[in-house]
Image (cartoon, rainbow, N blue to C red):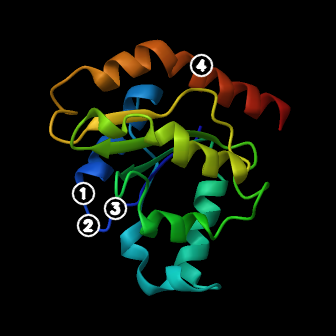
Amino acid sequence: MKLTVVAGNPKPGSRTLDAARLVAEAVAGREVDEIIDVITLGPGLLGWGDVGVASAVESVRGSDLVVVASPTFKATYTGVLKLFLDQFATGTGLENVVVVPVMLGAGPAHAMAPDLFLKHTLVELGAVTPAPGLYLIDTTYTTDTAIADYVARWGRVLTDAVTTRTDIS
């Protein structure tokens, strides 16, 4: 199983990236295979045909389980993540890839953002999202039980979806 993290934070090496990695490792029970810190792809995100961006897209498309994470900006995900997701074809760009939408925020006001905004975009691109998105408080995700609670409830659903996807491919 190829396990990938995509972090769409305007700051490289962000808490968003760290949280996504922790979620991915908790779900899979092992270290991630690839980390894509979207902001490091630079200006190639603004157009089409950039080799680095294309390589990142193909890596995500070739993954079995992907955690896509963003901080909450203006009640939704970031523009830099949107630029990256725009590189995927509608309907088939993430076809059969199991994806976990994760968002971080300062408080509970936007707790539905992963499901209301990010998950819908991922599904539009063909992703399989068998579990609800995960919203984490950016100052407590390393000390609270939100990730462990999510994995206890949804981890098996996610890993079973990967197994099912692999069996029919």
Distance Cα–Cα, label 2 vs label 3: 5 Å
Distance Cα–Cα, label 3 vs label 1: 7 Å
Distance Cα–Cα, label 1 vs label 2: 6 Å
Q: Which residue is mark 2?
A: 11
Circles 1, 2 touching at the beta carbon (< 8 Å):
yes
The residue depicted at 38 percent of the width and 27 percent of the height is 26
Q: Residue 9 — which label?
A: 3
Q: Is residue 83 left or right of residue 104?
A: right
Pick whichever of labels 1 and 4 is earlier in the sequence.
1
Q: Which residue is mark 1?
A: 14
Q: Is residue 63 visible?
A: no
Q: Residues within 10 Å of mark 4 (few under 14, many from 20)?
A: some
Q: Nearer the viewer, residue 25 or 149?
A: 149
Circles 3, 4 touching at the beta carbon (< 8 Å):
no
The residue depicted at 42 percent of the width and 13 percent of the height is 152
Pick whichever of labels 4 and 2 is earlier in the sequence.
2
> Where's residue 43, x and y in %?
44, 86
> Where's residue 54, x and y in %?
61, 74
Q: Residues within 10 Å of mark 1 (few under 14, many from 20)?
A: some
Q: Residue 157 — which label?
A: 4
Q: How many marks?
A: 4
Q: Secondary structure at mark 3?
A: loop
Q: Secondary structure at mark 1?
A: loop
Distance Cα–Cα, label 3 vs label 4: 27 Å
* Location of the C terminus (image quadrant): top right
Q: Is residue 79 visible?
A: yes
Mark 1: amino acid: Ser
Q: Is residue 108 left or right of residue 115?
A: left
